[in-house]
């Protein structure tokens, strides 16, 4: 199997792909990038926290006009994963308002972004309809 | 109790026509707005004690000093500010703070931008993918993420903000958001300074080019050139000026700037709601007025989807009631709380740094009874609002001279 690398460092690959956040040990606020202090409570200790891999679409847009080089249309969404908000594309769904709806249940899925000159595959993530 | 010396007033104010100004550069536009504001107030650069200067897209160029060289170098302090789409309101806040502090009794604020033909102003962090994956940046990404992990483009970000409101409270639809745009384009037909002043039917708006569902092109703010400027004077100084100057002066009853406090999802989708509600709450308290006292509101309709949520954030309606509020006709110019009678950012245009002063000009012009065909009759109190993503929110409440 080809060597793989995640698109971003908060995507954990393997048998059970999931997202991981820096969780403030004092108040539980979660951040996908590193913080010097918690933006909510100013505490400075963080621990890794796995994010639920299923969720609900709380907002979406279907982007039809994007910067050069970005394929359209695509569906961008805010997914509520058990109380943690996640930014992602909705994938494996027809990108129109008949097939993408507010409140739809989705699950994390991975997809190949591309393969570099050394044969390493970059793996991204999105959310696909649950039971679809 | 506020004494006259604590009060802030707009003495003079001006906005240029918004649109394409091929023959004018940033300095020319700024000079036109500032000259207009000074003349409107019956004062000169020699009377000014401070300048708050706003420009976003060339924020490192020192537009304030460039303006001085064009109109008058008097050696006063200049604060060049950049605060995303709240840049103009921030420049005005600088003048207000300087006058309020007593450091000077008159201050100038201006905002200027050239944006004609600018296209999308964000997104496109995606360049070509590298030949070997190397993690970089704060998320250790091996390839650009715009379009791969959600969207960076503003029409898409604000589309989600409107959709989130719909998910929370229900009642939204593509058609509803398009109707908000229909209202603003209709309002713009009475505004000779608007970049676009043609009415658009609901069918035209919904049938236009889709940018980011549910925002079609006419539901997005219009990139254009423009400038606006205001002269702020203390209450004490105003009393020494002519009766005509006092009669036309417009009281700044509240001047507020907020940023976004932490909210669970704010790292995912910018929260434009909490900081707007906080700014509005502070502004109503400072001014001693409530939403029902407002005769007109100019709010930040950078996209049709944004206007809806700000009805609620500015407390023009009950919590969760923005859809019903709009459907009641309240925000049309004939309604109980006219919103964006200028045409708003969708048709008047959005030369970023000018917007937060141009909306004050619009309200002030109605309060003076000088708005011509689009005058809201008997207007006594108005509110202006801008949001800069990142985020910053400016709210000003203005009142007609007693």
Image (spheres, coloured by chain):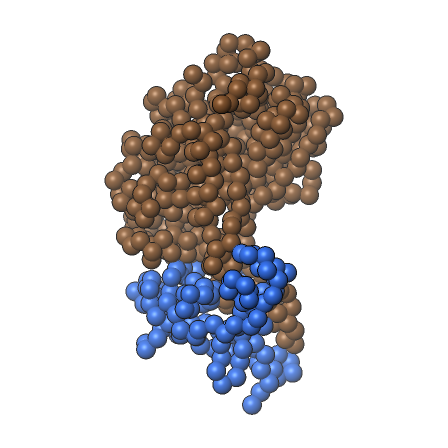
Chain colours: A blue, B brown
* Quarter of the image where one finds residue A61: bottom left
Asked whether B67 or A19 is in front, the reply is A19
Residue B237: x %, y % from top left: 59, 16
Vertical position of residue B99 compared to residue B281: above or below: above
Residue A46: x %, y % from top left: 58, 67
Vertical position of residue B85 compared to residue B110: above or below: below
Vertical position of residue B70 compared to residue B178: above or below: above
Residue at 72%, 23% in the rendered image: B74
Asked whether B341 or B330 is in front, the reply is B330
Q: Is residue B369 visible?
A: yes
Residue at 37%, 24% in the rendered image: B379
Q: Is residue B11 visible?
A: no
Q: Residue furthest top?
A: B243
Residue at 30%, 46% in the rendered image: B321
With B68 as the anchor, is A131 left or right in this view?
left
Vertical position of residue B107 compared to residue A132: above or below: above
Q: Residue furthest bottom?
A: A1
With B323 as the anchor, is A54 left or right in this view?
right
Q: Residue furthest front?
A: A26
Residue B92: x %, y % from top left: 57, 32
Residue at 69%, 40% in the rendered image: B61
């Amino acid at each position: 199997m080809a060597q793989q690398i995640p698109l971003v460092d908060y995507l954990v690959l393997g048998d059970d792909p999931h997202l991981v956040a820096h969780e403030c040990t004092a108040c539980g606020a979660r951040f996908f990038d590193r913080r010097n202090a918690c933006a909510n409570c100013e505490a400075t200790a963080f621990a890794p926290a796995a994010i639920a891999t299923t969720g609900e679409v709380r907002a979406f847009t279907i982007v039809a006009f994007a910067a050069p080089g970005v394929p359209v249309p695509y569906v961008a969404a805010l997914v509520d994963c058990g109380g943690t908000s996640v930014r992602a594309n909705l994938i494996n769904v027809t990108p129109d308002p008949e097939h993408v709806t507010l409140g739809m249940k989705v699950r994390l899925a991975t997809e190949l972004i591309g393969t570099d000159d050394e044969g390493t595959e970059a793996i991204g993530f999105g959310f696909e309809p649950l039971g679809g | 109790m506020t004494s006259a010396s604590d009060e802030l007033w707009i003495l003079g104010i001006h906005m240029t026509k918004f649109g394409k100004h091929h023959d004018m550069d940033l300095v020319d536009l700024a000079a036109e707005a500032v000259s207009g504001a000074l003349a409107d107030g019956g004062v000169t650069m020699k009377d000014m004690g401070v300048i708050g200067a706003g420009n976003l897209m060339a924020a490192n160029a020192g537009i304030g000093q460039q303006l001085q060289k064009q109109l008058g170098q008097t050696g006063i302090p200049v604060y060049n500010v950049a605060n995303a789409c709240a840049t103009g309101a921030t420049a005005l806040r600088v003048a207000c703070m300087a006058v309020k502090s007593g450091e000077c009794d008159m201050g100038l604020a201006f905002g200027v931008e050239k944006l004609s033909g600018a296209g999308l102003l964000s997104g496109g962090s995606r360049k070509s993918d590298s030949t070997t994956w190397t993690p970089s940046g704060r998320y250790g990404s091996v390839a650009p993420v715009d379009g791969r992990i959600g969207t960076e483009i503003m029409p898409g970000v604000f589309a989600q903000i409107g959709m989130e409101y719909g998910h929370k409270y229900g009642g939204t639809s593509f058609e509803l958001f398009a109707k908000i745009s229909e209202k603003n384009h209709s309002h713009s037909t009475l505004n000779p300074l608007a970049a676009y002043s043609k009415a658009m039917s609901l069918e035209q708006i919904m049938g236009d080019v889709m940018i980011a569902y549910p925002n079609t092109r006419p539901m997005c703010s219009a990139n254009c050139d423009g400038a606006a400027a205001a002269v702020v004077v203390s209450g004490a100084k105003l009393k020494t000026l002519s009766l005509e100057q006092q009669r036309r002066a417009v009281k700044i009853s509240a001047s507020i700037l907020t940023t976004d406090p932490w909210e669970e999802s704010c790292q995912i989708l910018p929260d434009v709601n909490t900081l707007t509600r906080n700014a509005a709450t502070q502004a109503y308290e400072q001014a001693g007025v409530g939403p029902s006292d407002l005769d007109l509101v100019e709010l930040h309709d950078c996209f049709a989807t944004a206007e809806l949520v700000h009805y609620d954030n500015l407390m023009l309606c009950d919590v969760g009631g923005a859809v019903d509020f709009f459907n009641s006709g309240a925000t049309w110019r004939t309604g109980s709380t006219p919103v964006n009678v200028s045409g708003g950012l969708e048709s008047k245009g959005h030369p970023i740094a000018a917007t937060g002063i141009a909306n004050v000009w619009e309200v002030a012009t109605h309060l003076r009874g000088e708005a011509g065909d689009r005058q809201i009759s008997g207007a006594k109190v108005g509110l202006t609002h801008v949001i800069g993503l990142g985020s910053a929110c400016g709210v000003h409440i203005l009142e007609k001279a007693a």
